[in-house]
Amino acid sequence: MSIHRPALLTDHYELTMVSAALKDGTADRRCVFEVFSRRLPSGRRYGVVAGTARLIELIRDFRFDPTEVEFLLRTGVVDEAAAAWLTDYRFTGDIDGYAEGELFFPGSPILTVSGGFAECVVLETLALSVLNHDCAVAAAAARMVTAARGRTLIEMGSRRAHEEAAVAAARAAYLAGFRFTSNLAAGARYGIPTAGTAAHAFTLLHDDERAAFASQVATLGKDTTLLVDTYDISQGIRNAIAVAGPDLRAVRIDSGDLAVIAQQSRELLDSLGATETKIIVSGDLDEYAIAALAAEPVDMYGAGTAVVTGSGAPTAGLVYKLVEVEGRPVVKRSEHKATIGGRKVAVRRHKPTGTATEEVIVPQGVPDRQPNDRLLQQSYVVAGESVPLPTLDESREHLRECLISIPWEGLKLSAGDPAVPVTVVPAG
């Protein structure tokens, strides 16, 4: 998807800086900006990098069209010199960062943007809007995947998000390990498998529940899912099996005490001979609700609101900060918002068994590499040209391997220290 609405993706103050820097001659000074989190959201032990490939695509097509430049001039946001600069804008710098699907921790330099000051600073809002959203969704989704203990998860949150955010959220959830999305735009755009079933409205449309089920089965066959809680769940299950037979693929339950109802539904299905019919549950599920159902006979979870809103942490808390000017480290000293100057290099340190033990970050230097260290940054853009990136499925597998590598305490849903400690080592 190409974006040609930079006026909507650039903050006023960014263009104020561009105008001033062009006037005083500092616009082309070689700078390094880094994206990082000062702290993880409350209760989280790791973050998940997501949205980088989307961001690189947006930067590749990032342009100011004539109508937008005219608007900026007319409203006094920029002067004539800045307007001319915006008209010809193309990012010509370099971008490096953690791979999509990588875990991050406080201080992890997950994205590094290098180039002239003006061409880099104008990307701040775009970079943070993409990464803060996608990383938040991916972290919540990854926690749900852990809580599900191998059971299938469907992303069903499109109706709880902005239409474009819904597509991005479906992508981030799939990256994190969800198997399906109900969002067809995400399926078409990113190749994510889609799944879904009829809503209560379809049952209410018909004269009775059996008629609705019969219509759905006649159209889709028995390899479908029937929503059985419009009226009475037990009777809904009986009607579903009476219409479809014992080889119905699945029933979905969207309300009530799901732990109790799942047990009762499984017993009823088995008594009707539908021993292979799966039980799907949905209805405001988050990672804690999913974990609470671990011992129940649930085969699949549908998660909506919680996953697309980051399950209580709708932003990853990422910031975009200038750390180097013409090779000289620069720092911000504000209380509680201080930065570490200089471009960073990071490695993840592991035991010979593969368990991650530490993240080592070196400003303006190269880490003293050990045998089981893994370099965390890779190139995304070189001199304005994007490089080939891993596929979404490859990034999904990378995250799965990363989650396996952290100590088991790091997967707990309770509050605690980051799963992997971070050490910032002065350059030697």
Image: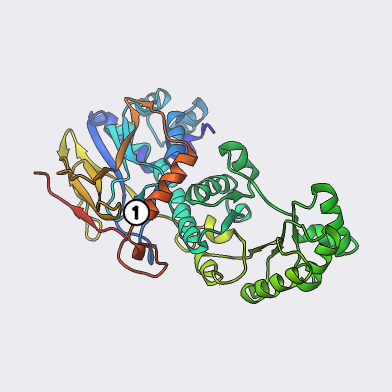
Query: Residue 58 versus residue 19: which sits nearer the camera?
Result: 58
Q: Can residue 397 be seen by looking at this rendering?
A: yes
Q: In the rendered view, does 202 fall on the left or right side of 127?
A: right
Q: Is residue 317 visible?
A: no
Q: Quadrant of residue 356?
A: bottom left
Residue 227's place in the image compared with 354, above or below, is: below
The number of discs equals 1
Residue 411: quadrant of the picture: bottom left
Residue receiving disc 1: 405
Q: Reply above or below: 375 against 138.
A: above
Work out which quarter of the rendered image holds the C terminus and state it.
top left
Q: Residue at 64% across / 46% down in the picture?
A: 194
- Looking at the picture, which amino acid does disc 1 mark? Ser
With respect to residue 380, does 401 lie above or below?
A: below
Against 390, is 174 above or below?
below
Asked where in the image residue 77 lies, by quadrant, the reply is top left
Give me the residue at 25% from left, 37% from top: 32
Kind of element beneath mark 1? helix
Q: Residue at x 24, y 60 (%)?
A: 336
Question: What's the colour scheme?
Answer: rainbow
- Residue at left offset 49%, top offset 56%: 141
Observer-nearest residue: 405 or 303?
405
Task: Please provide percent x and percent y for residue 113.
Answer: 31, 36
Q: Assign the N terminus to one quadrant of the image.
A: top right
> Which sits in the foreground, 292 or 316?
292
Farthest-out residue, left: 428
* Residue 346 locus on image (x, y percent): 24, 45
Image location of residue 196, percent across then percent down: 69, 52
Judge the density around disc 1: few (<14), some (14-19), many (≥20) Cα neighbours within 10 Å. Answer: some
Where residue 46 appears, as percent x and y from the top left, is 36, 58
Give 178 or 171, whichever is nearer the viewer.
178
| 250 displayed left or right of 327 | right
